[in-house]
Every structure is written in structure tokens, then in C-alpha cells.
């Protein structure tokens, strides 16, 4: 499927908003919705009452989302969902197992039930709710929930974060490469936690990417910033003729080599340790992937990395970019609010709209940019491109 320009600035909707009468209509709407008298009246009128209630609920959720997240964190830390997955339990049994005062436990269960994490079954026993089941099906989400306590700490004063007034951030410490000008000198203990987290969440991403862009036509993959090799391993399993190399920081590469050996892929896989912002990428590959790597980089570095990939590919091959993007319809807060603030707290990078990545690819000397539809664009979208005729 060919790339469609769908950034906010280019949509029909955005052009409408520049028309005078439409701007006046929006002003009138803002005044009306912001008027407390109108809000009260709307709640009394049967036809519009449900719209007013939905808006009120959306506002309440916006104000209180942090409480929902902390209820989730409590469930995760207690291992509550795992216990309920084995069998439903009564509140008394759970209070005993979890060593919690009965009243607090019941408060937590009520909160978790309202969030569909648990549900009350026969004879008052507690089982898993629909979202609880879905969470358990993906263990990496549990790791992310725990990891979010670092992000939560960084967001406790969002203005201090935005003004750069914090004395370092938790996410900056976690993603150690974002805080140093010589990432290649990081030690194994500094890359271990983030590499583990990335590998755990990679399975879902790799499935999406490999379904959107099957690797049948490729023989040699270079996964740049490939972490401990989870994507490369999934790619080799999906395409038995494929060989793969991970380019990453030296201690991360050591982890990738260990994974390839563990998974019996050692004879088709290798690694190349270095700093992708300063060292040339190895040559001889017909596919180079950047999975959740570009949005980690500020604009200048991201463009330089794309140029480096272009030089490595020479005149042939394909670059594949896979990451969450900013303008994903139906998931706008994921790109703009979640990733926007996550990367700000980390200290570098930003999520970009697909149209902007396409422009960057073209500036770096790529052409024929295509978008490949994934089943869960909220998590990851995929663009591919080919080297253009000039050197880039
Ligand atoms: C967000 S992680 C993504 C890992 C993997 N692609 C994935 O999706 O699971 C970014 C990766 O880029 C690597 N990286 C960051 N800066 C780098 C640099 N300057 N040179 C080489 N690798 C780097 C990190 O070590 C990390 O493995």
C-alpha cells in the first residue's frame, strides 16, 4: 500500500478550520460548552443528556487516570491477577494470601472490578475480569506497568520536567545511552534493565512488523539498534533462509549473541558492536531495520542515522522503520501525550507523524516510501523505502 499523507495539517478537517465561518462556529461551541449553566441545562434535556454525561465521564477520567494506573500497579505488585488466573478466590482467602487488611483488600477489589481487571463470580468469589485476562496474556505489559513507576516519578512536577529543572530523571537514568556522549562505553549493568524490558515487549511488535512486511524477498538483515536480538530472532524464525546481524552498543550485542546461541540461531546470526551515531554501519545487507529506534533520537541525529543506513545499503536494498507514530487515527493520545512526555522525560527523541518520517527519509536519499498496514497501529506502524539514485 502506498504512503498516504494524512498529517493533521493536511487533512480536510484542518483546512476547514482555517475558514472564517468555521472558526466563528468553533468559538461559539467553546463558549457554549464552557458555560456551567449550559452544562446544567444539558443534563436535564433527555436528548442531549447522554452526550453531556459522556463528556463529564471523559473529563473525570482525564482528571483521575493516575489513580486508575496506581490501582493497576497495586494489582501487579501483589501478583493478584496471577493468583486469580489459577482459580477464583473469596476476599477472605485473598486477604490471607496477600497479607493485606481485609478492608483495604476489599477497597482494591472494588476498584479493580470497576476497571474490569477482576469480576465477582458465583458465591462472591473473585475471578479475572476481561481486561485482567487480556493483561495476563501479555506478560511484558506487567513489566511496563512496573517500569511506569519511574515515569510516574518524573511526571510528579510536569512543569519542572518541561522547564528542564529536574536534577536528572528516572527515565534518563534507566535509558543510560540517552545521557552520555559516548554510549559505546556503557557497561553491561547499565544496559541490562532496558534491554530486558525491550526484549520482553518485542514479541508483539515483531509479529505485527513481520505480518505487515514479510521478509520473503530478503536474504541478509541488519537490525540497527536491535537490542538483545529479539526482533532479529523472530525474523529468522519467520524466514528460514534469512541471516541476521544486530548492530548495537557492545554490551547489548553480547546479550544478543547469548540469545542467538540459546535459541539455536547462532549459525545464522551475528552482531556488530558500536555507536551508530559515530561509527559506520557494516555493509552487504539487503534489508536494514530500525525498530523503535528513530523516535529515540533528536531530529539531527535521526537524520544522520538515516544517512548512515543509506550509505550502508549502497544502491540496493530496503530500509524498514517500525515504531509508534504520532498521527495514528484513534490513538492520538498514545503518540502525542504518552510518547511525547515519555521521550521528554527520557531526555531525547520524539514521536513523529508518518509524513515527517517520509520527508526525513527523502532528505537522507531514500525514495519509494511505502506505508505497510499493521493490525495494531497504536503499537507500531511500518514504513519502507529504497535508496534513491543520488548519494543522499
Ligand atoms: C528503544 S531500544 C530498541 C531496541 C529494539 N530495536 C526493540 O525494538 O526492542 C533502542 C536501542 O538502540 C540502542 N542504541 C541507542 N543508542 C545507540 C547508539 N548510539 N549506538 C548503537 N546503539 C544504540 C540501545 O542500546 C537500544 O538497544
Image: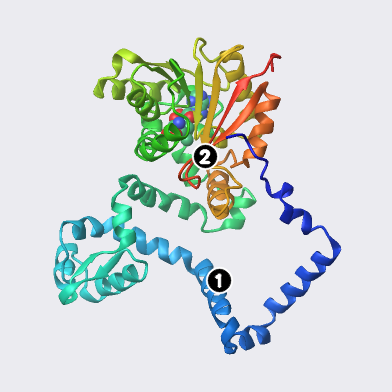
Q: Residues within 10 Å of mark 2 (few under 14, many from 20)?
A: some
Residue drawn where x is 32% and y is 67% of the image: 112
Q: Position of residue 228 (x, y in %)?
A: 37, 28
The answer to whether residue 346 is seen in the rendering is yes
Q: Which mark is nearer the camera, 1 or 2?
A: 2
Tag 2 residue: 373
Q: Position of residue 377 (x, y in %)?
A: 50, 45
Tag 1 residue: 59
- Compared with 391, 325 (above or below) is below
In front of the other: 91 or 265:
265
The answer to whether residue 183 is seen in the rendering is no
- Compared with 108, 322 (above or below) is above
Q: Position of residue 224 (x, y in %)?
A: 49, 24
- Compared with 298, 281 (above or below) is above
Dot 1: element = helix
Residue drawn where x is 78% and y is 54% of the image: 15
| Extreme-front residue of the structure | 1
Amino acid at each position: 500500500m502506498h504512503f498516504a499523507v494524512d498529517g493533521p495539517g493536511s487533512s480536510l478537517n484542518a483546512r476547514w478550520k482555517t475558514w472564517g465561518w468555521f472558526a466563528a462556529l468553533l468559538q461559539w461551541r467553546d463558549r457554549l460548552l464552557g458555560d456551567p449553566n449550559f452544562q446544567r441545562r444539558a443534563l436535564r434535556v433527555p436528548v442531549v443528556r447522554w452526550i453531556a454525561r459522556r463528556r463529564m465521564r471523559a473529563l473525570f477520567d482525564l482528571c483521575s487516570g493516575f489513580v486508575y494506573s496506581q490501582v493497576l500497579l497495586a494489582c501487579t505488585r501483589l501478583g493478584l491477577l496471577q493468583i486469580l488466573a489459577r482459580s477464583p478466590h473469596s476476599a477472605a482467602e485473598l486477604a490471607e494470601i496477600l497479607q493485606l487488611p481485609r478492608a483495604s483488600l476489599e477497597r482494591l477489589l472494588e476498584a479493580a472490578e470497576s476497571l474490569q481487571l477482576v469480576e465477582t463470580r458465583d458465591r462472591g468469589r473473585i475471578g479475572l475480569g476481561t481486561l485482567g485476562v487480556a493483561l495476563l496474556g501479555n506478560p511484558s505489559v506487567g513489566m511496563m506497568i512496573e517500569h511506569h513507576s519511574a515515569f510516574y516519578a518524573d511526571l510528579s512536577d510536569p512543569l519542572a520536567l518541561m522547564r528542564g529543572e529536574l536534577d536528572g530523571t528516572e527515565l534518563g537514568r534507566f535509558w543510560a545511552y540517552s545521557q552520555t556522549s559516548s554510549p559505546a562505553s556503557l557497561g553491561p549493568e547499565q544496559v541490562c534493565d532496558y534491554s530486558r524490558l525491550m526484549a520482553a515487549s518485542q514479541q508483539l511488535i515483531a509479529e505485527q512488523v513481520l505480518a505487515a512486511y514479510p521478509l520473503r524477498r530478503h536474504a541478509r538483515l541488519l537490525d540497527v539498534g536491535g537490542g538483545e536480538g529479539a526482533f532479529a530472532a523472530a525474523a529468522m524464525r519467520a524466514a528460514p533462509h534469512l541471516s541476521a546481524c544486530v548492530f548495537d552498543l557492545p554490551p547489548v550485542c553480547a546479550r544478543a549473541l547469548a540469545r542467538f546461541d540459546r535459541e539455536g540461531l547462532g549459525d545464522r546470526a551475528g552482531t556488530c558492536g558500536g555507536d551508530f551515531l559515530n561509527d559506520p554501519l557494516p555493509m552487504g545487507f539487503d534489508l536494514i531495520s530500525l525498530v523503535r529506534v528513530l523516535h529515540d533520537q533528536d531530529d539531527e541525529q535521526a537524520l544522520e542515522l538515516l544517512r548512515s543506513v543509506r550509505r550502508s545499503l549502497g544502491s540496493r536494498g530496503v530500509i524498514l522503520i517500525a515504531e509508534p507514530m504520532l498521527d495514528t487515527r484513534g490513538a492520538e493520545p498514545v503518540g502525542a501525550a504518552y510518547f511525547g512526555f515519555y521521550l521528554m522525560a527520557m531526555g531525547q527523541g520524539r514521536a513523529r507523524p508518518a509524513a515527517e518520517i517520509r520527508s526525513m527519509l527523502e532528505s537522507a536519499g531514500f525514495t519509494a516510501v511505502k506505508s505497510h498496514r499493521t493490525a495494531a497501529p497504536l503499537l507500531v506502524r511500518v514504513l519502507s523505502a529504497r535508496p534513491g539514485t543520488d548519494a543522499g
